[in-house]
């Protein structure tokens, strides 16, 4: 069934005629003659369109339009994380942290969990870079200084490059 706009007149076998008053993401709010205000899921096949408004209201969005906007915002804010593969030789492996004091227990961590934390750190540094570069108050000199500091942070993280499957995902510090 095609997306129904606010103002569409519909007929339902149980509730009679009604008018769509709200177009929500997964349902319609409809005022029916016999049932009053009801929320009907968009998958309901009992609705029959009697009369559609001539023009879709300007402030009404389809589910596809909402999804496009959300995807754009999430990509802009780097909330949609890129899938970064762990090197095959590390799959299923564990990292053992052995204290110098042998009376203390060692800590064992699945490498996948540690790797996930490293990737999250990298993603957050990228968001920080974007925020610095688009900051409306910082001067260009301040932005460059902060960017150089972040580059040095990346350089400190190059040790973890051995975990990545693909060199395109490596940390890269200042190049000399």
Image (spheres, rainbow, N blue to C red):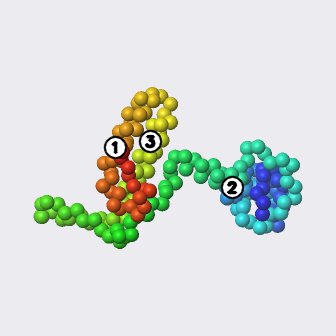
Taking the image as drawn, is residue 161 in sight? yes
Report the disc number at residue 103. none
Q: Nearer the viewer, residue 1 or 47?
A: 1
Q: Residue at x 83, y 63 (%)?
A: 48
Secondary structure state at the residue bearing disc 1:
loop
Query: Quick one: which residue is furthest to the bottom in this view?
Result: 92
Q: Position of residue 40 (x, y in %)?
A: 72, 60
Q: Residue at x 48, y 34 (%)?
A: 135
Taking the image as drawn, is residue 36 in sight? no
Tell me: 46 left or right of 27: right
Q: CA distance from mark 1 to mark 2?
A: 48 Å
Q: Position of residue 9 (x, y in %)?
A: 84, 55
Question: How many labels sit on residues?
Answer: 3
Q: Which residue is mark 3?
A: 129
Q: Nearer the viewer, residue 12 or 157?
A: 157
Crowdedness near tag 2: few (<14), some (14–19) or many (≥20) residues, C-alpha within 10 Å: few
Q: Position of residue 155 (x, y in %)?
A: 33, 47
Quadrant placement of the N terminus: bottom right
**Foreground disc of the pair 3, 2:** 3
Q: Residue at x 52, y 54 (%)?
A: 80
Would you say the residues marked 3 and 2 are in contact, meaning their CB atoms lie under 8 Å apart? no
**Foreground disc of the pair 1, 2:** 1
Reading the chain from its start, which is encountered first: label 3 or label 1?
Answer: 3
Reading the chain from its start, which is encountered first: label 3 or label 2?
Answer: 2
Secondary structure state at the residue bearing disc 2:
helix
Secondary structure state at the residue bearing disc 3:
helix
Q: Position of residue 47 (x, y in %)?
A: 80, 63
Q: Which residue is mark 1?
A: 176
Report the disc number at residue 64. 2
Crowdedness near tag 1: few (<14), some (14–19) or many (≥20) residues, C-alpha within 10 Å: few
Which quadrant holds residue 49? bottom right
Q: Nearer the viewer, residue 19 or 146?
A: 146
């Amino acid at each position: 069934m095609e997306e129904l706009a606010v103002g569409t007149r519909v007929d339902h076998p149980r509730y009679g005629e009604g008018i769509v008053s709200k177009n929500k993401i997964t349902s319609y709010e409809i005022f029916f003659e016999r049932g009053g205000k009801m929320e009907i899921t968009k998958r309901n096949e009992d609705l029959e369109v009697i009369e559609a408004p001539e023009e879709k209201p300007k402030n009404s969005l389809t589910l596809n339009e909402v999804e496009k906007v959300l995807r754009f915002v999430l990509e802009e804010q780097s909330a949609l994380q890129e899938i970064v593969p762990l090197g095959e030789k590390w799959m299923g492996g564990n990292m053992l942290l052995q204290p110098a004091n042998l009376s203390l227990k060692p800590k064992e961590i699945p490498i996948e969990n540690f790797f996930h934390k490293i990737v999250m750190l990298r993603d957050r540094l990228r968001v920080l870079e974007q925020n610095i570069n688009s900051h409306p108050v910082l001067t260009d000199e301040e932005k460059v200084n902060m960017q150089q500091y972040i580059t040095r942070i990346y350089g400190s993280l190059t040790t973890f490059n051995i975990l990545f499957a693909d060199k395109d995902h490596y940390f890269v510090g200042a190049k000399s």
